[in-house]
Image (cartoon, rainbow, N blue to C red):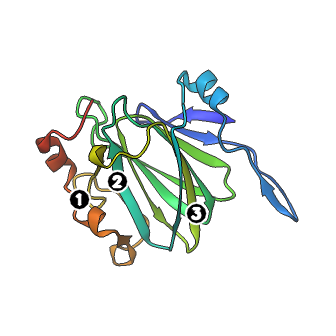
Amino acid sequence: MNLTPLSIEGAWVAESPVWSDERGFFREWFKAEEISRIAGRDFSVAQANISSSARGTLRGIHYSLAEGGQAKWVTCVSGSIRDVIVDIRPASPTYGKSIVIELSGASGKAVLIGEGLGHGFVALEDDTTVAYLITSPFSPKEEFEINPLDPEIGIEWGLPISELRLSPKDAAAPSLAERLAEGNLRG
């Protein structure tokens, strides 16, 4: 596995070989030992999630204020997504900046999203499946969202706004500036 740091501290892209033949493909998508060796951090899995989405489904921007933070390891199992990582740490030099990475079922790529970063993605095709591992379990009182269409963040989702499908919760989410004013950001 190759693990390469991205332009926001705490965000990494992982690339693993994909072995394909007429039967399909095989890939190792997560190796805790490699994360420890390359990134110098422990990634203890507390929960695993899978989502299935139709084209245009936008999930996020989500983050957790759980004790000790919450890191994520995200990959696309089938279909394709435009994955977005947003620096929501007010003291960070890249605060408010975002990174966009395209992931697909056959790409062999995953992303490591460190504590204090926001995350979202949009499905670029029907029947897109995303799997992610997280370092702290879901806790409704500590889970927050930022509006993915916040113009100050200015994320290019890769599809026309008219094609985006948001949950009511994400569509009504506050902006990054509103979350900062509420005191619901850390770092």
Mark 1 or mark 2, which has the lower sequence index?
A: 2
Residue drawn 33% across the image and 68% down it? 167
Q: Nearer the viewer, residue 169 or 150?
A: 169
What numbered label is drawn on residue 173?
1
What amino acid is labelled 3 in the image?
A: Thr
The reply to whether callout 1 and callout 2 are in contact (CB within 8 Å) is yes
Residue position marked by numbered label 3 in the rendering: 129
Q: CA distance from mark 3 to mark 1?
A: 24 Å
* Secondary structure of residue under mark 2: strand
Q: CA distance from mark 3 to mark 2?
A: 18 Å
Quarter of the picture holding the C terminus: top left
Residue 13, image quadrant: top right
Q: Is residue 114 left or right of residue 168?
A: right
The reply to whether callout 3 and callout 2 are in contact (CB within 8 Å) is no
Q: CA distance from mark 1 to mark 2?
A: 9 Å
Q: Residue furthest left?
A: 181
The reply to whether callout 3 and callout 1 are in contact (CB within 8 Å) is no
Where residue 176 sits in the image (x, y, percent)?
21, 48
Where residue 170 sits in the image (x, y, percent)?
29, 62
What numbered label is drawn on residue 61?
2
What amino acid is labelled 1 in the image?
A: Ala
Image mark count: 3
